[in-house]
Image (cartoon, rainbow, N blue to C red):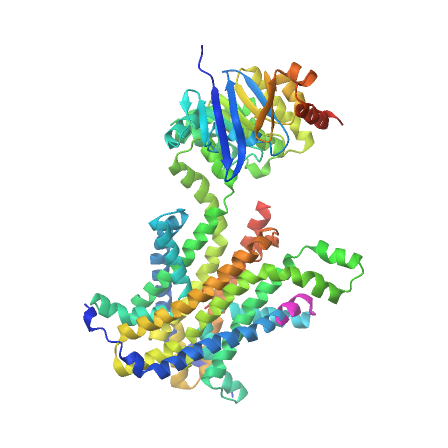
Amino acid sequence: MEFDPDIVIRNLPKLLDGARISVIAFALALGLGAPLAALVCAGRMRRHGFLAALAGGYVTVFRVIPEAVLIFWMFYCLPPLTGYTIDGLWSGSLALALVSAAYLAEIFRAGIQSVPSGQWEAAKALALPRRTLWLRVVIPQAARLSTPPFINFLTELLKGTTLLATIGVADLALQAYVLGAQTFRYMEFLTAIALIYFVIIFPVARFAEWMEHRLAASTR
Amino acid sequence: MIDFANLDFSWLIKFSVPLLWGLWTTIWLGVVGFAIALPSGLALALGRLYGGWYLRLPILAFVDVVRFTPLLVQAVWIHFALPALTGHSLTANQSGLIALSLHVSAYICEILRAGIVAIPKGQWEAARALGLRQRQTFAKVILPQVWPLVMPPLANVSVATFKLTAILGIIAVTDLTKAASRANTFIFRPLEVFTVVALVYLAIGLVLAWIAWRIERRYGAARQGRVAPAGALTVPVLVGGQRGI
Amino acid sequence: MTQPAVLIENMNKWFGHFQALHDINLVIAPGEKVVICGPSGSGKSTLIRCINRLEEHQQGRVVVDGTELTADPKAADRVRREVGMVFQQFNLFPHLSVLENCVLAPMSVRNLSRRDAEARAIRYLERVRIPEQSGKYPGQLSGGQQQRVAIARSLCMEPKLMLFDEPTSALDPEMISEVLDVMTDLAADGMTMVCVTHEMGFARHVADRIIFMDQGHIIEEAPPATFFIAPRHDRTRAFLGQIMGH
């Protein structure tokens, strides 16, 4: 068979439409997921009580259930449950947001917990108020430590947006698949989008890795 | 709004055979996929660490391409694009199994590599000073120390493998998700169908996560005692346990 | 009679089932310098950490500067505002410059303006003899310099009492004296000090009183002259023999 890259170029507008949908899903999932993650993390930081249990349960459930299953569930069940028609892009992004919140909450928590206990003690011994303790001492250090796993998570989320294809949202992956089916040129289209994802994710993931090495070296 | 008195679960019995068949497909795909990925991952890790450049470079490329592209794209590529190259078409299950085990083996390779690298050089030197050969050192000294380090992340990857099976419906693998979708097209009771399916997945996932948690607790102490160089172990742990989608 | 800086009465402390401190009684007068020594695991760090409630005691009374430490977090806060602490591991905030480390608490706890807080910080950094390092980050300083910054950071709160928890134990030998010199100066200026340390030279010159602890008990307390020349207790003698014997 001959490989015909031109066919990809000719269909670039459709692929760009798909890319736009992927970007929207990514932004929605992150924009809704990150604030929710902060709340869940606050619950996780408590040692006892209802909120701690709730946050713990949330993290367990949303990390264990397959994302694809959750996306299906939200797509089919949100409309009858709420009485509204909800677009697949929205319900799918919401599902990704719920899952993201669980993972991000754990990333934030790990960052906070890796701030050495001496830092907390020094802040206490200086009688720093809670606000100052969190805003000036704990969060800046936790943020530094959380950055590499956070960046890694962004790459995972980008890969996760392709799952919206399973409910027929015309993201980049589905566009390529459909174009492949219409033209019988699967090889060209599917290789092209695999390359696109790789070219975006590879440098970002490598950067996160480099940063993690540097952080580990500086804290030793 | 939904009327909860009108929920109807009678279809569960009518469609029990295809649904159970879907569940079976999900389970065997996950188990066999992981079983293939584990030794493949080890072989890749060894090749990546100790092979010549002609082994190391292709493995590095393979692992990166697999980790940095979505499984959904890989599955679709293997099922639809690859036959154009090879001239053989594969069944959905074959493509799905290949995609899943390749994907997971790349993650396992990274975990094992990080685990092996985490063993201090002094262990190699001490073994050499005692007159052990390289192969003996690896089998008798290094590997036994690697297992406790990598058990928790491997357990997380097993959970991830199970979750990933739900993606394979895109290439018409009739796993539980796909079987449920099909059943739903006949009876159109999405709320009941997908809630039941989600709960089944949740139940299996919780059991796996519980096992992973037990392993983590058992081997967690071993991991704390040793600082992996540059936190190398943490990357695959997060990614593996995360949505390795 | 003036109010004691620290008053500890019949204090007991447990970690789970392990009793870390047994029936501690201790009164420290304002201006007094007390050195606490003893083998590792004797409870000396735990005792000093009970004074600013980094550890909670389960029985007895701990009164610091007239405030009794209880479960009420406000009491701990009031005490901590007046009590500085220097840690073995320095515990400087690594993401803040030396100057920021010093002005953080005065600005947020004492509500000082940045200008006043910085002026004060410079004054105390001069006192610990490193004003020129104020723009650097802790990671760029030697251990001895970091510990002196930690002392300055505490002094910026102008505390009535300073606690030192093995301040020289994590230092390379050549840096110990620069820290001890600063502590000696501080003592000469009349600061009330409680120091957990193995530096017996410092104890001999600076302390008004030396307390020897073993297995959670206060075994012996005496002025340095008596303590070093005529220790009453066998365990004290054994400890002194080990620490000075070579």
Q: Quadrant of residue B199?
A: bottom left
Q: Residue at x 57, y 71 (%)?
A: B38
Q: Residue at x 47, y 49 (%)?
A: A111
Nearer to the camera, B44 or B74:
B44
Q: Position of residue C172 (x, y in %)?
A: 67, 33
Q: Position of residue B33 (x, y in %)?
A: 52, 75
Instruction: Residue at the far top: name it.
Output: C1
Q: Residue at x 32, y 63 (%)?
A: A94
Identify whether A7 is placed above or below C67. below
In the picture, measured across the screen, residue C6 lies left or right of residue C71, that is right
- The answer to if B47 sits in the magenta stretch is yes
Q: Position of residue C25 (x, y in %)?
A: 51, 22
> Which quarter of the image is occupied by the N terminus of chain C?
top left
Majority secondary structure of the magenta segment? helix
Q: Position of residue C193 (x, y in %)?
A: 54, 21
Identify whether C214 is placed above or below B50. above
Nearer to the camera, C187 or C12:
C12
- How many numbered discs? 0
Residue C84 can be seen in this image: yes
Residue C86 can be seen in this image: no
Nearer to the camera, A81 or A33:
A81
Identify whether A38 is placed above or below A135. below
Magenta stretch in the rendered image: B43-52
Q: Quadrant of residue C59?
A: top left
In the picture, measured across the screen, residue B109 lies left or right of residue A38, that is right
